[in-house]
Image (cartoon, rainbow, N blue to C red):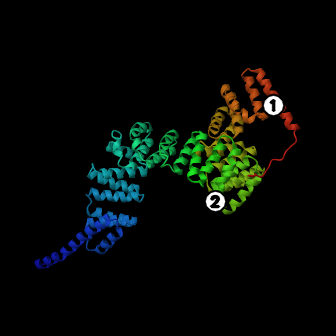
Amino acid sequence: MGLNTMLVYALLLLPAVTTCAGSIELATTALQQHDPAKALDLLEPLRSQCAQSSAFYEAIGLASELSGKASSAEEALRMAVSLDPKSPRLLTELGATYLRNGNSSDAARALDEALALDPTNATATKYALGAAVQAGSWQRAGALFHKLGAEDHPEILQTEPILFLWFAQTLIETNRADRIDPLLSSQRKMMDASLLFSLGTLFAKHRMYERAVEYLRQVPAGSADDAVYFNLGLSYSHLKKFDQARESYFEAIDKHSEHADAYLHVGLDYVSSGDLRMGIPWLFRAHAIAPARTDILYALVEQLLELGYSDTAKALLSEAIGSHPRDAFLAVARGDLERAGGDQAAATESYQRALAEQPGLTAGLVGLARTNIAQGKESEAHDLLRAALSGDAEDPFANGEMGLVEAHQGDWDAALQHLSRAWAVDRSNVKIALELARAYRHKQRLREALQLLDSLRPAMQESPAFHFELAQLYADLHRPADAQAEREAFSNLEATAHAALPFDVPRTYVH
């Protein structure tokens, strides 16, 4: 190429460069005015002229992101970084874009490169924190918070409320939950309602229910919506403070009259505390509000069966199964209905269908175990219940059935463990309570057995089995007069039961 030709080529390039820079400046102005569509209109025609400009691709990337074009934004910012790989700003923008699109691994990689180039880049550090939290890389998150100085100076988190939430979660996940209160309490008065709600919900998800209540109750009444009161109710429910839970659920219903979950949990709380009949109307109301929700219908059908209203349960199930033929929980409910009617073979088939739809479903495994127990197959039942507990170690039904099997086999240590877990979660099954009292007695924990039976007395005064167990316990406690009184109560109830006219159990629930 001759000198004259080179000069002409250089002169031809100048307008292109000027046009590129000018268009980028105009596009940047459009972005500042929140008009990404205009920015893209200015930039798109210049792709060939601006092919070597990182600033051009940066502007394209930001405009694409603001326009909701995620893949185009990533592509443009990757091109910008390839043209200027030593720019912490471009790497930060690329990492932030990856993060917004849910790509935490690529986000972390780009942001780590940005921090390697500029370790003091606070913006990159905050986005890197987001990537670590999104990926569940809690040690990395902890190191980044340490770099920010969050533990010594928590006030630096005030400018970004999400950092408070991430910080609390990082402390929990790194087994430093004891540091939360000292670090956050001094900042609590400056937290807005949304942050208090988010922190309370975070604590509830990690089963830190006392702390969840503490933060949720601080949400000002004027800012508290149904979600605040519902989460507060759930926290109280887990703490077995059912009166406070109901008050919170009622507040949620006042805010949102069709709050199906609030009605559902009022009903479930009544059931959990042993008052099934009070629970049924609330479950019916929840079902009326959300008839398509099979979880609500399942809970309702189970309580109807528990109280013997099999015809109502059958009618509800028949209608729902037609609309949801492959729902695993409805298949379990059908199995429970068939088992209650004595058809163990049909029940087994229903439970197997549920497990085919949802392998490992605890309710299906427990139901299948119960059919095996009814047929004397305790070994098979034991294996099924062990599988259920491996998936959910706290499930009250699996623990209860396992405890009953172990008690029947005379393994009182194991029975005590499983029966205690079942009773701690669900106080509705008095059969579990009686067997737990027996386990206490066999392990010579007589005072605990007596305390448990005394708590059952109001509800079981008419139960022969209750008086029989109490008589045996009084004998072990060397209280012969009390033991004799309980034996007499047992005999009188047995005689009355034989002499009384039989009444049909109502199979239909009237409400």
Q: Residues within 10 Å of mark 2 (few under 14, many from 20)?
A: few
Considering depth in this image, is 355 or 319 the residue closer to the camera?
319
Q: Does any portion of residue 322 appear in the rendered image?
A: yes
Q: Give the mark, 1 or 2, whose residue is nearer the N terminus.
A: 2
The residue pinned by badge 2 equals 292
Q: Does any portion of residue 444 appear in the rendered image?
A: no
Please tell me which residue is depicted at 65% across the width and 33% down the height of the picture: 416
| Residue at mark 1 to residue at mark 2: CA–CA distance | 47 Å
Q: Vertically, is 197 above or below 448?
A: below
Q: Quadrant of residue 24?
A: bottom left
Residue 209 screen position, x and y as percent: 52, 41
The residue pinned by badge 1 equals 490
Q: Disc 2 marks which amino acid?
A: Ala
Q: Residues within 10 Å of mark 1 (few under 14, many from 20)?
A: many
Marker disc for residue 360:
none
In the drawing, does residue 506 fall left or right of residue 440?
Answer: right
User: SS for tag 2?
Assistant: loop
Please tell me which residue is depicted at 41% across the width and 38% down the height of the picture: 185
Please tell me which residue is depicted at 70% across the width and 30% down the height of the picture: 454
Considering depth in this image, is 379 or 227 the residue closer to the camera?
227
Q: Vertically, is 275 above or below 300?
A: above
In the drawing, does residue 449 fall left or right of residue 231?
Answer: right
Q: Quadrant of the N terminus?
A: bottom left
Q: Disc 1 marks which amino acid?
A: Phe
Residue 121 screen position, x and y as percent: 28, 51
User: SS for tag 1?
Assistant: helix
